[in-house]
Amino acid sequence: MEAISKKIKSSNLKVTPQRIAIYKALYETKSHPTAEMLYNDLKDNYPTMSIATVYKTLTAFKKAKLIQELNLNDSSFHYDINTDFHSHLICTCCKSIFDYDFSVFSEISEKIENETGFCVEHTQLYFYGKCGECQKQGNN
């Protein structure tokens, strides 16, 4: 908990129990949850936390570059604590989201910067298809 508090504080954000809980929940999952999913996971242990608090906290974390927001063209944004360049694999059947370290990002960004002078600040790359489990089960 102390490491999470330091991380939040070093981003010039106020440290609150709710912010610690939200950051910890993101840190402990690979599922790329939505704000609603986080709220539902945390509301029993934090009964005074509102969905608005979750949204405001995620916005603050995003602005502080503690997390990244994923726009997967569905009804809600998803959140990822991994802010390093990496791509996402999205299963069109079960809607699972997987991280994939695509090291070519840094090479492409460097090439763009060298050839055009354009400074790449952020990159997101999504691959849509069927995960191995859905393929085994014959899901469409």
Image (cartoon, grey):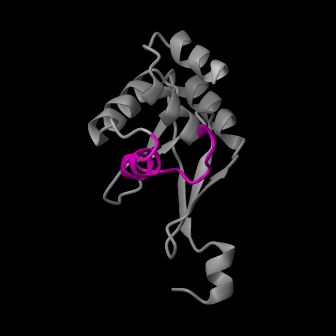
Identify the residue at image location x=42%, y=53%.
Answer: 37
Question: Which of 85/29 is in front?
Answer: 29
Give residue 51's quadrant in the image: top left
Question: Which of 75/106 is in front?
Answer: 75
Q: Magenta stretch: residue 130 in it?
A: no
The location of residue 63, given as percent across then percent down, is 40, 23
Residue extending furthest toward the left = 52
Identify the residue at image location x=38%, y=25%.
Answer: 60
The location of residue 24, given as percent across then percent down, is 57, 35
65 is higher (above) or lower (below) than 51: above
Residue extending furthest toward the bottom = 138
Identify the residue at image location x=67%, y=77%.
Answer: 133
Q: In the image, which residues are magenta?
A: 27-45
The answer to whether residue 67 shows anywhere in this view is: no
The answer to whether residue 50 shows anywhere in this view is: yes
The location of residue 61, given as percent across then percent down, is 44, 27
Quadrant containing the N terminus in the rendered view:
top right
69 is higher (above) or lower (below) than 139: above
The location of residue 111, given as percent across then percent down, is 63, 31
25 is higher (above) or lower (below) than 9: below
Numbered label tally: 0
